[in-house]
């Protein structure tokens, strides 16, 4: 009998036409197996999969997350220009970045109002607008 997390992972991969390799399924189970959205770094996903007993390299995790982004299953949110989080919620929405604990969470989209963005330079178009609100404890 197939477990619910495994079934969700297989369906998630199939929705993007991705072949369900052992590594992809293992990563997808952690990402979407419980039906909730996740914000993970490659390193935290690697640790979670390893804890589950799956053998996968960190390079494979990075490559698979990039493939998930290319397939539209995840979106990459870059913080500090060097740290990337991968979000399973691919709809446009803002994020809170908790500086003290280096965690990314969704921010309430209904409270964000962007009334105008600058015009794109000639010959270009705006692909998306990413909003990351940095939080830290008050002193």
Image (spheres, rainbow, N blue to C red):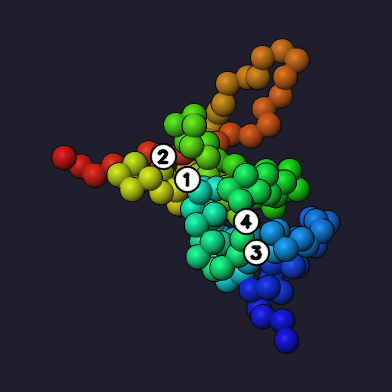
Label 1 vs label 2: CA separation? Answer: 6 Å
- Quarter holding the N terminus is bottom right
In the rendered view, does 93 fall on the left or right side of 74? Answer: left
- Rate crowding at label 1 as few (under 14), some (14 to 19) or many (20 or more) other CA atoms within 10 Å: some
Residue 15 appears in the figure: no
Q: Residue drawn 44% across and 48% down?
A: 104
Label 3 vs label 4: CA separation? Answer: 9 Å
Above or below: residue 118 compared with residue 77? above
The residue that label 4 is drawn on is 56
Q: Residue furthest top?
A: 122
- Quarter holding the C terminus is top left
Asked if the residue at tag 4 contacts the one at tag 3, i.e. Cβ–Cβ closer than 8 Å, the answer is yes
Percent position of residue 84, x then y = 53, 40
Asked if the residue at tag 2 contacts the one at tag 1, i.e. Cβ–Cβ closer than 8 Å, the answer is yes
Above or below: residue 5 compared with residue 79? below
The residue that label 3 is drawn on is 26
């Amino acid at each position: 009998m197939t477990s619910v997390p495994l079934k969700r992972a297989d369906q998630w991969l199939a929705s993007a036409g991705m072949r369900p390799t052992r590594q992809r399924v293992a990563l997808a189970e952690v990402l979407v197996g419980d039906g909730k959205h996740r914000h993970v770094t490659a390193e935290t996903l690697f640790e979670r999969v390893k804890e589950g007993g799956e053998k996968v390299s960190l390079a494979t995790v990075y490559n698979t997350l990039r493939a998930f982004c290319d397939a539209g299953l995840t979106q990459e949110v870059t913080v500090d220009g060097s740290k990337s989080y991968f979000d399973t919620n691919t709809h446009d929405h803002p994020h809170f970045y908790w500086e003290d604990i280096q965690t990314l969470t969704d921010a309430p989209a209904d409270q964000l109002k962007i009334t105008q963005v600058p015009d794109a330079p000639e010959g270009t178009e705006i692909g998306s607008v990413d909003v990351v609100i940095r939080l830290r404890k008050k002193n």
